[in-house]
Amino acid sequence: MSPLDHILSGDRPRSRILALLLIAAFVALAFAPFLFPGTKALGVASRICIFIVLAASYDIVLGYTGIVSFAHAMFFGIGAYGVAIALNWDTSWGAIALGLLVAIIVSTLLAAAIGLLSLRLRALFFSMVTLAFASFALILASQLRDITGGEDGLTFSVPHLLTPAFRLLSQPFLGVRIDGRVVTYYLVFTTATLLFLLMLRIVNSPFGRVLQAIRENEFRAEALGYSILLHRTLAGVIGAVMATLAGGMLALVLRYNGPAASMSFEIMVDGILLMTVIGGMGTLYGPMLGAVLIVLAQYELQPGLAALSALVQNVPVLPRLINPDRWLLWLGVLFVVIVYFFPNGLVGRLRKRG
Amino acid sequence: MSCLLETRDLTIRFGGQVAVNAVTCAFQPGTLTAIVGPNGAGKTTYFNLISGQLAATSGSVWFGGENVTGLGVHQRARRGIGRAFQLTNLFPHLSVLENVRLAVQARSRAGVDLFSMATSHRNLIEQAMAYLERVALAAKSHLPAAALSHGDQRKLEVALMLALEPDIFMFDEPTAGMSVDEVPVLLDLIEAIKRQGDKTILLVEHKMDVVRRLADRIIVLHNGTLVADGDPAEVVALPVVQEAYLGVRR
Ligand SMILES: Nc1ncnc2c1ncn2[C@@H]1O[C@H](COP(=O)(O)OP(=O)(O)OP(=O)(O)O)[C@@H](O)[C@H]1O
Ligand SMILES: [Mg+2]
């Protein structure tokens, strides 16, 4: 077995175009601070890394296990609040570790509780219960003002190593100042890469194979001696813990957290769900691609439309149609078109072509 | 010899209908028991009560001296109750090999191994291939299960049960819908299990020639009730069996 197969757990992209796209995305992210200098670009790149982990973790739950949960942003929020609350209380690495640990414990307990429910409830009703969990968490986050900062959220400082004032090198490297922002970015990039590869390993492990068997034919998997409850719940917990870690990274990057930043339904639907479905469920590479595309669209569609509408300002109707304020509409159109033409997502489509 | 499986007053009701009615019966290792009866007699339902897909209204199921009535399907499977289904029940989009590998893996208890690659467990794959050899499907191991012919799917169904290495094998009309030239492979297979000497086999079968060839004992279900039990030659001669089989032989 080649070293590449060890790293990718034998799960190759299985499409030349997909492989090229993934390599391009990886290289662009690996050298983002040098290829795309500037604070804003670095923010976009960080966000892509974080959402790759988040969407992939949702794919374990939705794509590999077939659980339709709307509570995934809740786990993302728990991670972000864990780090935010801890850093708000004490600016230290110990506080980050403690905040993450508490967040992981809370997420694990909640995910286990939701997993246990999944066996007792029918699919549609289960999805509604996850929605109830998510709403309740969101209400808690905005109501417990003393702890979470309410709707305004929390702004906090991070350890010196991660602050813009910190200089890793006294001289710029390749024309870029290596400050705390770049350090933060590489912390996020490395963590995201490792977590993604870990998830790739998990879905290709004996456990991952059982998840696929359960998705294919739950009745038969149980007759072979597999506990549906155990495997479903464990998959839910793994997805939740990964989302929690992604949330922790988000808080470190933003040095801020609030309900809209990490826990809202916009994150759940426009973010996680859209990325996973557009990219292709049950492939992990799909959500990775989806995360890249959607985050870029969220940042670039608006300015892109502005440029486009300026270009056609003398044509009737058109400028209004592609008014930058309509970007959400166009994102929706993109979503419908992709889902309609590629029901198995981009990766499903690319793999069919070979 | 002490019995491996026993049902005591096992009963299930669907609304007003009693599909299995107070069936008390014990099954010994090394014996192949054929279960016969007309369509709708309750044979499959009796199997579902034993392997756990249905919960009994009353009565109990004992396996290896333990009351398993309250246990779930997966717990009974792990204790050694093997089942091949009447309606083929596979993982259609997974390969033939992966179907069997999952069964082998279930027995190896690697199901909660999260951090190794499934493909690195060579021994599981080799064992799975060996079971596929036994049902003459090795050459088709790479195909998705859904691409197999009906007869081959029936064989794969049996291979999944073999791979679990159960103590009791429950076959529910294994040859139904198979072409004439495919049937012998399956019957030889059942005979091979029988020859191991220590396995308990339950076989639901409509074809009386098959029953005569394989069975050590026949029990007859009729409207959910056990109406006859004994030596094949005796049971086949009983008036109630002659009656039950009028017009229902396929
Ligand atoms: N889940 C269920 N709900 C309601 N009725 C059921 C259920 N399962 C079986 N029955 C009924 O119980 C009776 C026995 O059915 P069963 O499938 O056990 O018969 P069988 O002996 O296996 O017949 P066949 O030879 O056609 O396979 C039938 O009348 C059937 O309609
Ligand atoms: Mg039947």
Image (spheres, rainbow, N blue to C red):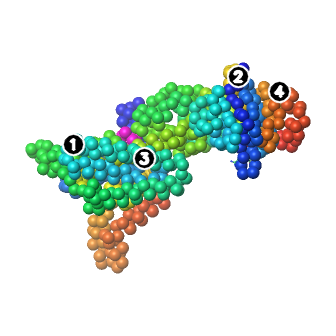
Of A57 and A106, the residue lying toward us: A106
Mark 1 belongs to which amino acid?
Trp
- Residues marked 3 and 2 touching at CB (< 8 Å): no
Q: Are circles 1 and 2 on residues that touch, CB within 8 Å?
A: no
Q: Is residue A332 above or below residue B150?
A: below
Query: Label 3 sits on what residue type?
Result: Ala
Please tell me whether mark 3 or mark 4 is closer to you in this view.
3
Contact between marks 3 and 4 (CB within 8 A): the answer is no
Cα separation between marks 1 and 2? 65 Å
Residue type at mark 4?
Answer: Asp
Residues tagged by mark 1 and mark 3 found on one chain of the structure: yes
For label 1, the SS is: helix
- Residue on which the image places disc 4: B231
Q: Which residue is mark 1?
A: A93
Give the residue at x 26% y 51%: A85
Query: Tag 3's secondary structure?
Result: helix
**Front of the two marks 2 and 4:** 2
Q: Where in the figure is residue A64, as x and y percent of width and height?
A: 47, 45
Q: Chain of mark 1?
A: A
Residue range of the region highlighted in magenta in the rendering: A196-200
Residue A124 % position (x, y):
53, 56
Q: Is residue A143 left or right of residue B47?
A: left
